[in-house]
Image (cartoon, grey):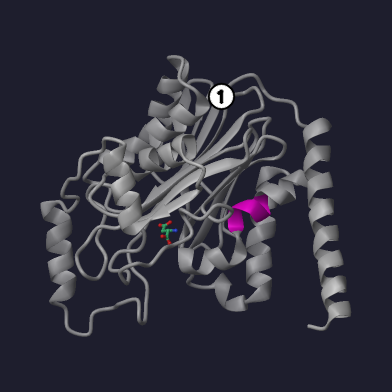
Amino acid sequence: MDSSDRRTFIKSVTGAALVAAADLSAAGSSSVAASGSPVFLSTWKHGQPANERAAEVFRNGGSLLDAVEKGINVPENDPNVTSVGYGGLPNAEGEVELDAAIMDGTRHRAGAVCSLHSIKNPISVARLVLEKTRHTTLAGGGAFRFALEMGFQPEQLLTPQSLEAWLKWKATPNRPSFWLTAENHDTIGMVATDGRGHMVSGCSTSGLAWKLPGRVGDSPLVGCGVYADDNAGAASATGDGDLMTNYCTSVSIVHSMARGASPQEACEELLRHMAQTDPRNRQGDQICVIAMNPRGEIGAASMNAQFKLTYALWRDGESRLLEAPALY
Ligand code: ASP
């Protein structure tokens, strides 16, 4: 790039950033009026007990961050949820590697951990990265040592069932692997508002079963698996993180809401954009998103009807499971 090209590039990037910033402050100052009541929205069936716990923590005086963290702890602790925390299916070498992130929409700060092993509550470690350090993301051995320093106890995260599933996969001739294809997943993603304009987004996962060791999906990446901004809203994503990372899904949705889209329109706009940029994204690929604005209005969508998103909504004391519309 010569210097004039570079100047044009910098000018256009700066211009785009200014437009986005103007969008965010416009959304913050005008139309967004909070509803007065908390709302919790999570991915998948295991999102329902997570929402209920989050609502309970909030009702008992916890902060919105406490509520989202403790809510997400529920599927993390459940050995029957094979895609999150304890009991999550391991990587190709039989080790459970966990990813999580939590973002505070008031401070515009997140904490995240990637490839964390032996600690069943990565969302709580991520929360401490946010509260106790000047970093945003810790990975692998460093994240593990940080967790130990924070008082977490290492434990075996393989359950008899997940070990058996891995041994079975390992013994399968011509088994599918991530050199070629994809397998089991289902992150817990949660977005929440306190009803007074504060937004939080959190997410926790064991990622894709049988992934290559060291693989990091979209979930712990700020802007991909989580994003929250009190001026516009919060979003989270679940599905094929290797694909979705390339579209920075959550921040794209939040910026659409900042430009005036409803949460549902913002979710669908992102999925349509993915389908338009690569028609292969319409078929087969597993791409689902959820969003909420500071008024507590929600959005949820999946790319296609072969992989429909069931989501959990807690509002006004009522806890429900619903199905998101599919675009294709
Ligand atoms: N997005 C997660 C990942 O790719 C998996 C999931 O949402 O189920 O790690």
Residue displayed at 30% across by 69% down = 213
Secondary structure, magenta segment, majority class: helix
Queried whether the magenta region covers residue 25, the answer comes back as: no
Residue 268 x, y percent position in the rendering: 66, 56
Res 228 quadrant in image: top right
Is disc 1's CB within 8 Å of ligand 1? no
Res 128 quadrant in image: top left
- Please indicate, yes or no, whether residue 306 appears anywhere in the rendered image: no
For the C terminus, the image quarter is bottom right
Residue 97 x, y percent position in the rendering: 30, 58
For the N terminus, the image quarter is bottom right
Residue 194 x, y percent position in the rendering: 58, 25
Q: How many marks?
A: 1
- Please indicate, yes or no, whether residue 69 appears anywhere in the rendered image: yes
Res 224 quadrant in image: bottom right
Outermost residue, top direction? 60
Q: Which residues are magenta?
A: 249-253
Badge 1 density bin: few <14, some 14–19, many ≥20, Cα 10 Å: many
Residue 18 x, y percent position in the rendering: 83, 52
Q: Which residue was labeled with disc 1? A: 38
* Residue 313 shown left or right of residue 146 in the figure: right
Between 217 and 54, the residue placed more toward the observer is 217
* Residue 121 shown left or right of residue 14 in the figure: left
Queried whether the magenta region covers residue 250, the answer comes back as: yes
Residue displayed at 22% across by 61% down = 95
